[in-house]
Amino acid sequence: MCKLVLPKTILNDKNIQNRQIFIIGDVHGCYDELKDLLILANCEADRILPIFVGDIVNKGPHSVKTIRKVRELNAYAVRGNHEEKALMHYFNWRKRNVVIPEKYNWIKDLDEDEIHFLQELPYTIEIPSKDAIIVHGGIVPGVSLENQNLTDFITMRSLQRNGDKLIASPSISLNEAWASLWFGPGHVYFGHDAARGLQQYPYATGLDTGCLYEGFLTGIFVDSKKILQIKAKRVYRTP
């Protein structure tokens, strides 16, 4: 993994500007579904602030268009494992002349500002006024954000018990969903776990509902907890 230590982002009232916060699950380049969800949520209006849980790119058909749409909206996003992988391949290509795998060739179409946008994506976004945290993968309970492993932020799905210790794991086999063991502080909104689908726990909400796999693209309004979904137009990737 290309572990770039980036600061977390904290959104205050000045950033939010009295807008409704609408958090969107893993897009994976499913641009058409994203457009439909934005229309359904009326996100083109100035009163809505979209925030993405990461993995806006890769696997799906329109990664470049999706990045440009997110930037056009002046939306916020956290870094996912697929943004990290894309950056790794980009810099291997630019600096070491390493051949890019075909599925990552789309990164050659990005300009410098768009690469910079991906580089600057934080691992977490905190919204103190909403008691909310956004992350792509997960957070290990009992460990402060500052002391979390950066890779866990973008890869974990589950927790393994080792005595009294909880250990992050990307696997869902024989492990507990990390969000089921999260009891604060803050309500966490996350993605990265299409296999489990929509997850709704008292202190955590998982929004990866597998649009890529002919599931849904899902978003939630933080204040009302209203959930909106758009059905995928087709199978973009076999599960």
Image (tube, rainbow, N blue to C red):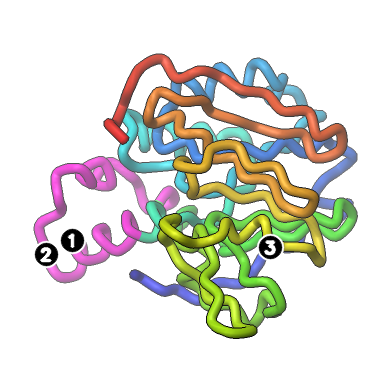
Which amino acid type corresponds to the residue marked 2 in the rendered image?
Asn
Question: Which region shows up in magenta?
Answer: 85-114
Mark 2 and mark 3 in contact (Cβ < 8 Å)?
A: no
Quadrant location of residue 199?
top right
> Is 97 displayed left or right of 33 in the figure?
left
Name the residue carrying label 2: 97
Looking at the picture, which amino acid does disc 3 mark? Leu
Vertically, is 15 above or below 43? Answer: below
Disc assigned to residue 181: 3
Name the residue at 71% across, 51% down: 204
Q: Is residue 120 visible?
A: no
Quadrant position of the N terminus in the picture = bottom left
How many residues crowd around disc 2 within 10 Å: few (fewer than 14), some, or many (20 or more)?
Answer: few
Q: Are marks 1 and 2 in contact (CB under 8 Å)?
A: yes
> Looking at the rendered structure, which numbered label has been put on residue 93?
1
Residue 90 appears in view: yes
- The reply to whether the magenta stretch includes residue 71 is no
The numbered mark, 3 or 2, whose residue comes first in the sequence reads 2
Looking at the image, is mark 3 or mark 2 nearer the viewer?
Answer: 3
- List x then y, in percent, for residue 142: 71, 78
Q: Is residue 190 left or right of residue 168?
A: right
The secondary structure type at the circle numbered 3 is: helix
